[in-house]
Image: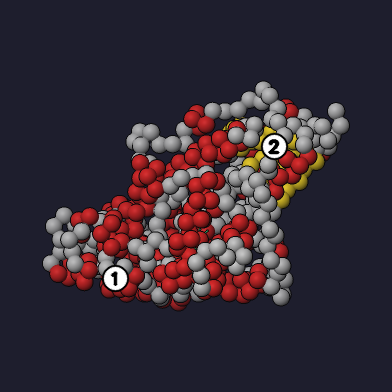
Amino acid sequence: MTDIEKPTLVWLRDDLRLADNPALAAGAQLGAPLVIVYILDEMSEGIRPLGGAAKWWLHGSLEALSKDLASRGQRLVLRHGPAVDVLLELSGEIGAGHVFWNRRYGGGERAVDAAIKTSLKATGVVVESFQANLLHEPWTVRTQAGQPFRVYTPFRKACRAQLPPRTPLPAPDALPLPLPDVRTDSLSDWRLMPTKPDWAAGLRATWTPGEAGARTQFQTFRTERLKDYAARRDEPAADVSSRLSPHLRFGEISPFQLWHGVSPEALAETPKIELANVDKFLSEIGWREFSWHLLFHQPDLATRNFQSRFDAFPWPAVNEASLVAWQQGRTGIPIVDAGMRELWQTGFMHNRVRMIVASFLIKNLMVDWRIGEAWFWDTLVDADAANNPASWQWVAGSGADAAPYFRVFNPVLQGEKFDARGDYVRTYVPELANVPAKQIHAPWKSGGVAGYPEPIVDLGATRERALRAFAQMREEE
Ligand code: FAD
């Protein structure tokens, strides 16, 4: 068998799509028998095991991908275990001539990929990796002094100075046949879905994991939401953001598809959309790129302060009752409770509300940002190894280009400003359904509401306490 006739192995990871998938396209183009594998790796050092909500999503995404592949005469092989062992074994088992994958940017992931590449190359297998999930790979964007960026605006400027992102690839029309008899795990044996209890009803009602779901979501965004995006993206009840984050997290749609999907040519058919909306959307995609830039240069971003001076921050012992009240959305602060309940019910939370609940946990409850980050990691369907820690550190003040620590969100004012009619609160806090808009963000000021808790903390006093702790940290610098 010549190298070209030997089977090709395509390893899919955070790129669960057929369209704009360079590794898959390369495998298709070679024309040799094709084995497509996904490996559930919960053991390799430095790779963060998925949280519960993300596991739920992964199940749906793999199921959808399997169907899409089956409709093209292909199949998805599932294996689990440490990726180095599993991939090398599978490659040997099928006698692969080529192994292709799209690049990942986390520290643990890169170490795994590098180890596999070295071993495979030593046995004569051709290994090739591709750029698929970021518009700007972290090492390609540097300050003039050759350093990684620590501030968003110049980072984005440097990205924009580069060539426009490549055009997305179409899904391959036809795929080479699979190899028969390659063993696969059964997806249900992975037990990614919760059973006892089955807490995923709200997730099922809200989301359609998979590439087709991502496409539909993006189309809805372009035709119905984008026109209001810049003006209203901070309003949680307005529903104008794309809600593409979990689809992006699992690579069911690529940033290249998004970038080109909002170009003037692509939007020619839709009613006129002001450029400010497109700019704002691409700027948010830019924040995602920035988070990955940060994670690439600091792989332990989820556990270590980006600004080391925060290592001296005097976190008090955690008050478990307060933490549980926050997690369950029973703090007595309506916008915080609405956000935490949205999260629990749907696996998602609006961006503005994420900032508010994070600020409340860190500043008003004085809980270390890492504890909040871990809760989000477990409960968000879009839990992202870069965006999540980068955003928590941003709110904490310990991150890159962060909000200054002394900027403490006032959840009452935030609610009044961004949920002025109280619609968002009413959706998730039914106890407050009949409270008029004027009182809904601070019901305790008008005597409280039966069945809804009093605030667990005094917002003003806890704000002062947080500022004192910050001052103490600075004195120790
Ligand atoms: P859109 O407004 O439609 O934005 C489009 C895409 O841009 C998003 O899907 C996302 O990929 C990216 N994006 C938008 N805002 C940001 C941002 N501030 N930072 C980085 N990327 C952004 N996002 C995650 O994807 N995963 C997380 O785990 C996550 N954790 C967060 C934790 C906190 C405390 C905060 C404040 C923010 C977090 N974010 C996270 C960022 C942001 O809240 C979500 O990306 C956004 O709410 C997703 O909604 P959307 O897809 O409708 O966003």
Residue 297 placement: quadrant: bottom right
Residue 420, numbered circle: 1
- Which residue sits furthest right? 2
Q: Secondary structure at mark 1?
A: loop
Q: Earlier in the sequence, mark 1 or mark 2?
A: 2
Q: Secondary structure at mark 2?
A: loop
Residue 407 in the image, given as x and y percentages of width and height: 40, 75
Residue 77 in the image, given as x and y percentages of width and height: 62, 32
Cα distance between the residues tagged 1 and 2: 52 Å
Q: Residue at x 39, y 61 (%)?
A: 239
Q: Amino acid at mark 1?
A: Ala
Q: Residue at x 86, y 32 (%)?
A: 2
Q: Name the side, left or right, on which 35 lies relative to 217.
A: right
Question: Between 325 and 335, which is closer to the camera in this rendering?
Answer: 335
Q: Residue at x 50, y 67 (%)?
A: 271
Question: Between 55 and 70, which is closer to the camera in this rendering?
Answer: 70
Q: Is residue 267 above or below residue 41?
A: below
Q: Is residue 357 above or below residue 107?
A: below
Q: Residue at x 49, y 44 (%)?
A: 209
Q: Name the side, left or right, on which 76 lies relative to 281.
A: right
Which residue is denoted by mark 2 in the rendering?
175
User: Quick one: label 2, few (<14), some, or many (20+) residues within 10 Å?
Assistant: many
Residue 387, numbered circle: none
User: Quick one: label 1, few (<14), some, or many (20+) residues within 10 Å?
Assistant: some
